[in-house]
Image: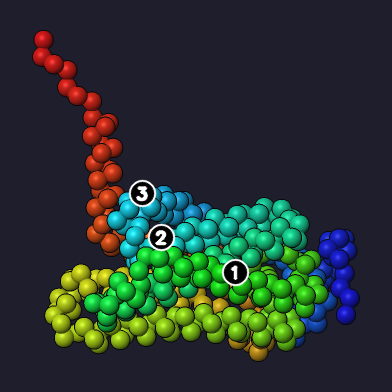
Amino acid sequence: MDFPGCASVRRANGTVHHLRETEFNSSSNLDDTTLLFLLEEWSLTPSGTNMKMFLISPVVCLVAGVLIIPTILFVIFSRFDIRQETRYMLLGNTLLSDLIYLLVYTLSAALNTAHLHLPKEACVLLLFLLAVAYCGGLFTAVAIVLDTYIAVSFPLRYIVILPPSRTKKIIALLWMCSGAFSGIFFCVLWTTHSFVPCVLETCSVPVILILTLNGTETVKLCFWVSTTVIFLCLSVIFGCYAILYFKTKHSGIWESICSRASVTFLMHNTVLFFYLFPLLALFIESFLYVNVAIRLQTGILVSLTVCNVLMILPKVLFPFLYGLRYREISASLKSIVRRKQLRTVSPAPPPS
């Protein structure tokens, strides 16, 4: 089936307005041409939605992330003893992925809010970088948990199992897997979805998610495979933490609720909850939309909330709740602050 081009869609404002009035709030099945008209019109002039309000969260989180993430990365890479440890290399890789995600997503959200149309290739590149950064952060989070599991379960063989040289290869492999996984998905999306390139000019992630759910069976399969992989990663994380808890619950480190182990465990699970909840919300919303249980407008608003708020929060919470829990990093940051304070204090003049 042939679809009208972007220019044709924009010239058909009267037709789109009529379609929007009669079908945008309907929960009935929409044919592909009608869906294209509605999504294109919504992305240009969203009714009842203040797009600038949804931009607040990415901007605030980006500012907070830019303030703390490069500082922690500087501490990790400036000290030889820190950057040679597996846990710190994995932490730095996660923070780098989160920083890239914050930068790219905030840029795409700002462009979409300003209604600046990008070439299709530029938007695909932004979306590809976004997917690679998200997968890189998620895969590295799994590696961090596995590293902790190996350190606790095999303390005497830990340095043999995960020496620094092997950790660097693992990090390179994680980026390769993230790029390959994202590349396959985007190749399938580009070759099988005939009307995505038109809406790609708006570069709106929530709109593209809706189009993906309304796409061909191949595209839907890629979406559900991606969702399954993400939930498998989170299952591995929760499973390893549960095993570690049962292995160490009789060691005495959990006796006090304020003990370092208890607080660290709580912080880790808080971060994981913020990683899991947005994905769960997207999964439920996708299921309801596919089964025509929610309206198109409701689906886009839920996607906007999930993408612009819930999926951004873990990226800025991770360095505060996880990175600063390491004594070496917090001590290095405190020493840097003290040195700066000493430099700003001018010496007292000698007595005359």
Residue type at tag 2: Gly
Instruction: Name the residue located 64 percent from the left edge and 60 percent from the top edge.
Output: 126
Nearer the observer: mark 2 or 3; the answer is: 3
In this picture, is 236 found above or below 338?
below
- Residue 60: x and y, percent? 47, 54
- Residue 278: x and y, percent? 50, 74
Residue in the foreground of this view, choosing between 248 and 306: 248
First in sequence: mark 3 vs mark 1: 3
Seen from this angle, which residue lies furthest top? 352
Instruction: Name the residue located 77 percent from the left edge and 75 percent from the top edge.
Output: 191
Label 2, secondary structure: give it.
helix
- Residue 40: x and y, percent? 76, 66
Q: In which quarter of the image is residue 337?
A: top left
Q: Quadrant of the N terminus?
A: bottom right
Instruction: Name the residue located 68 percent from the left edge and 72 percent from the top edge.
Output: 186
**Crowding near pointer 2: few (<14 within 10 Å), some, many (20+)?**
many
| Number of the label disc, if any, that sits on residue 179 | 1
In this picture, is 78 found above or below 281?
above
Q: Quadrant of residue 91?
A: bottom left
Judging by the rendered image, the residue that carries numbered circle 2 is 92
Residue 306 left/right relative to 114: left
Residue type at tag 3: Ser
| Number of the label disc, if any, that sits on residue 295 | none
Instruction: Name the residue located 53 percent from the left edge and 67 percent from the top edge.
Output: 175
| Number of the label disc, if any, that sits on residue 78 | 3
Marks 3 and 1 in Cβ contact (< 8 Å): no
**Crowding near pointer 1: few (<14 within 10 Å), some, many (20+)?**
some
- Residue 18: x and y, percent? 82, 71
In this picture, is 251 found above or below 51?
below
Residue type at tag 1: Gly
Spatial separation of the CA atoms under disc 2 and disc 3: 12 Å
